[in-house]
Image (cartoon, rainbow, N blue to C red):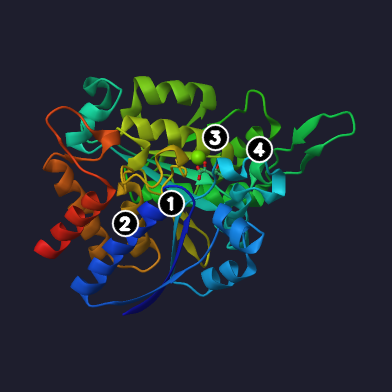
Amino acid sequence: MEYKIVVMPGDGIGKEIAEGAVSIIKKIEEKYKHKFTINYADIGGIAIDNHGTPLPQKTIDMCKESDGIILGAVGGPKWDHLNGDERPEKGLLNIRKELGLYTNLRPAIVYEPLKEASPLKSEIIGEGLDICIVRELTGGIYFGEKGVKEDGTAYDVLSYNEKEIRRIAIKGFETAMKRNKKITSVDKSNVLESSRLWRKIVIEVSRDYPEVELNHMYVDNAAMQLLINPTQFDVILTMNMFGDILSDEASMITGSIGMLPSASIGEKYGLYEPIHGSAPDIAGQDIANPIAAILSAAMMFKHSMGLTEEGTAVERAVEEVLNEGIRTRDIYTDSAKLVGTKEMVSLIAEKISSW
Ligand code: IPM
Ligand code: MG
C-alpha cells in the first residue's frame, strides 16, 4: 500500500530522534513492501526562524493531506524570550487544535530488563506494568481565555463543556474495553467546577460500558498512587493539564522519559510524538534516546494505517534490543552496553531485517 507521511522534526533532539523514526519507517517499507512518501515540514522554533511563525500554513496543509504525522519535539532557549502566541510550543498546540486531535494516548509500559533503570523499587513496579494515560488534548486550561490584566494579574481560564468531556470519556472507555477494562478518571472535583462536570459526564458515559470498572481519583492522590502502587492502574482518563503532568511522572516508572511514545488522534488525522521535550542541553551529541520516537512510529502504523503487524514488529525489535542489554545513556545501568542515538536506531533496524 501507499501512504503519505509528514515528518516534523522540530527543535533540539527532535531532529535526531525523528530521523531515527524515519530510518525505522524506511526499514518497514522495505521489509513489508509498502510505499511511504515522506515529506518534511517545519514546526516550532525552526519554523519561527524559517517562516516567522511557529506553525506555517504550509505545514497545516501538508498534515491535512497525510496518512500519518511524526513529530520530534519543539522549543529551546533560543526562543524563550518570546511571549504567548509567538512561542514554539504554540505551534504544537495549534496543530493539535487545527487537526482536531482531542485524544492523546500515552502508554507507559515497563520493559522487564529496564526495571533497574527505574527510580522505583522493583517490588513496587511488579510484573508487566502497563498503564495507558488517555489525556484530553484540545481543551481545558491550555486553550481557555488567557491574558494579563491592566493591574498585571495574569490569568488562564480552565473550562470544559459536556461535549468535550463526553467524547474523550468515550475514547477512554473504548481504550479500556481493549485492555483490562478498568478506568481511573482523575480530576480535582473537590475544588474545581469543571472537574465536577467532568465526573458527572464520565459517570454518564460509563453506563454504556457496564463491563468497565470505573473509579475516580483526585489528581494529587493519583500523583502519589503512581509512585506507591502503580499496578492498580489500567487506563487513566484525565484532562489536558493533569495528563501532561501525570504522563511525565508515569514515564519515570518505566525508567526514562525517553521511552514514552504518544498518539494524538482525532476523527480524521493522527499525529505521533514522544512525550518528552526537545532537551536542548543534549541536542546534537548523539546521546538522546530515540526509542520514544520509534515507538511513536509503531503507534502510527497501528492507529492511522491499520498496519498492526508492522507496528508490532517495531515494538518487538525495541524489546529484543533492550533484552540484549543495549542502552542509551538515560537508561544505562551497570554491565549494559552503552550506545549512542544512531547506533541504537541501527540496531533496532537490523533486528527488523533479521527476521
Ligand atoms: C507534551 C508537552 C507539550 C504539552 C508542550 C511542549 C506544549 O509537554 O506534549 O507533553 O504541554 O502538551
Ligand atoms: Mg508534557
Cα–Cα gap, marks 4 and 3: 16 Å
* Left or right: residue 276 compared with residue 259: right
Mark 4: amino acid: Leu
Residue located 60% across and 42% down the image: 201
Quadrant for the C terminus, please: bottom left
Q: Secondary structure at mark 3?
A: helix
To which residue does mark 2 refer?
20
Does the beta carbon at disc 3 come under 8 Å from ligand 2?
Answer: no
Compare marks 1 and 4 and give the one earlier in the sequence.
1
Cα–Cα gap, marks 2 and 4: 42 Å
Q: Quadrant of residue 113?
A: top left
* Left or right: residue 189 compared with residue 318: right
Q: Nearer the viewer, residue 227 or 26?
A: 26
To which residue does mark 1 refer?
14
Residue located 57% across and 52% down the image: 45
Mark 1: amino acid: Gly
Compare marks 1 and 2 and give the one earlier in the sequence.
1
Cβ atoms under marks 1 and 2 closer than 8 Å: no
Mark toward the viewer: 3 or 2: 2
Mark 4 neighbour class, 10 Å CA radius: few under 14, some 14 to 19, many 20 or more: some
Cα–Cα gap, marks 3 and 2: 29 Å
Mark 2: amino acid: Gly
